[in-house]
């Protein structure tokens, strides 16, 4: 598990409920109660209490000059809401680490060497209505995480510094997550299911205009893709690697993608997903 270390120095501290926070100094802003930003904050933000809300009101949080490299950090907290923020970070935009049952909504995270949004060892978190743009790796990433919901998010052009950057990446043994009604475009892949992720439900998403629409890596099993649009990707619609046979595709549209085809099964039948009742699949290829 990747760890990001928060600064100890507290330059701004919100101590009363639902008070406005004036971001009049650089550095780390620590949130311990309901807080509304009244202007941009030049530094990172650490949410350090359960059950609080950070409402940026459309203002920006810039973690570019912070030692820690994130814009907003939630670590070991629960029932927190972060909303209406424009976040910039050197490494990660919004990082949720060892945290549970939080809501991240209506935010924009731009840039960074790693992912725009990352959930690391988290459960029960909801990310909804967020935009990820121009990050070095993934737009939205789940690592060692389960039972999270990503709903109605958009991920654009997230692969600037990684050859395998994805709009949405489910990594590192993550399982039982739900991705519903999201959109990914102009990424290296729209959706990436890495090795040993399982039992994730991917429903009603649009993975279009990427290099590859969907990548299912080896030993990724038990995942279900239902009624997704996988179209107009420049190379492949769906690429399934070997030993990934137990994934279910139902009612998807996989068509109008580039060469070598709409579905490529790496080394053939060992990577054959279970395909049922798909609206349209224009072509299936097998090979290395």
Image (cartoon, rainbow, N blue to C red):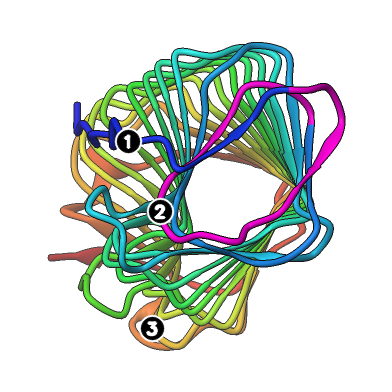
Is residue 103 covered in magenta?
no
Q: Is residue 223 above or below residue 95?
A: above
Q: Where does the image place residue 177, in percent across and percent down from the top left?
A: 56, 25
Whichever of callouts 2 and 3 sits on the residue coming sooner in the sequence is 2
Q: Which residue is mark 3?
A: 235
The image quadrant that residue 104 belongs to is: top right
- Mark 2–mark 1 Cα distance, whole angstroms, equals 8 Å
- Mark 1–mark 3 Cα distance, whole angstroms, equals 48 Å
Q: Which residue is mark 1?
A: 9
Q: Label 1: few (<14), some or many (≥20) within 10 Å?
A: few
Residue 27 disc label: 2
Q: Label 3: few (<14), some or many (≥20) within 10 Å?
A: many
Q: Is residue 271 left or right of residue 186?
A: left
Magenta region, residue range: 16-34
Residue 192 disc label: none
Q: Quadrant of the C terminus?
A: bottom left
Q: Where does the image place residue 266, in percent across and percent down from the top left?
A: 21, 56
The image quadrant that residue 24 belongs to is: bottom right
At mark 1, the secondary structure is loop
Q: Nearer the viewer, mark 2 or mark 3?
A: 2
Discs 1, 3 touching: Cβ within 8 Å: no
The image quadrant that residue 203 belongs to is: top right
At mark 3, the secondary structure is loop
Q: Where does the image place residue 276, in percent across and percent down from the top left?
A: 65, 39
Q: Is residue 89 above or below residue 102?
A: below
Discs 2, 1 touching: Cβ within 8 Å: yes
**Rendered residue at 78%/23% (across/down):** 16
């Amino acid at each position: 598990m990747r760890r990001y270390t928060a600064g100890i120095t507290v330059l701004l501290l919100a101590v009363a409920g639902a008070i406005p926070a004036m971001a009049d100094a650089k550095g780390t802003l620590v949130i311990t109660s309901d807080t509304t930003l009244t202007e941009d904050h030049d530094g990172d933000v650490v949410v350090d209490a359960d059950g609080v809300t950070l409402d940026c009101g459309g203002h920006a949080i810039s973690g570019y000059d912070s030692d820690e490299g994130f814009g907003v950090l939630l670590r070991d907290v629960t029932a927190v809401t972060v909303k209406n923020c424009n976040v910039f970070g050197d490494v990660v935009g919004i990082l949720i680490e060892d945290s549970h049952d939080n809501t991240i909504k209506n935010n924009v995270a731009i840039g960074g060497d790693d992912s725009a949004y990352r959930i690391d060892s988290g459960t029960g978190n909801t990310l909804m209505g967020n935009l990820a743009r121009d990050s070095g790796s993934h737009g939205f990433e789940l690592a060692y995480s389960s039972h999270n919901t990503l709903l109605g998010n958009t991920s654009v052009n997230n692969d600037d510094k990684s050859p395998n950057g994805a709009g949405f990446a489910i990594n590192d043994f993550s399982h039982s997550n739900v991705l519903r009604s999201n959109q990914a475009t102009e990424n290296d892949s729209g959706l990436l299911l890495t090795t040993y992720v399982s039992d994730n439900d991917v429903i009603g998403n649009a993975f279009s205009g990427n290099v590859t629409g969907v990548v299912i890596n080896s030993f990724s099993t038990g995942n279900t893709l239902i009624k997704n649009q996988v179209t107009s990707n420049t190379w492949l619609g769906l690429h399934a690697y070997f030993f990934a046979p137990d994934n279910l595709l139902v009612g998807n549209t996989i068509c109008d993608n580039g060469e070598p085809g709409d579905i490529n099964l790496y080394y053939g039948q060992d990577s054959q997903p279970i395909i049922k009742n798909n609206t349209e699949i224009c072509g299936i290829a097998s090979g290395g």
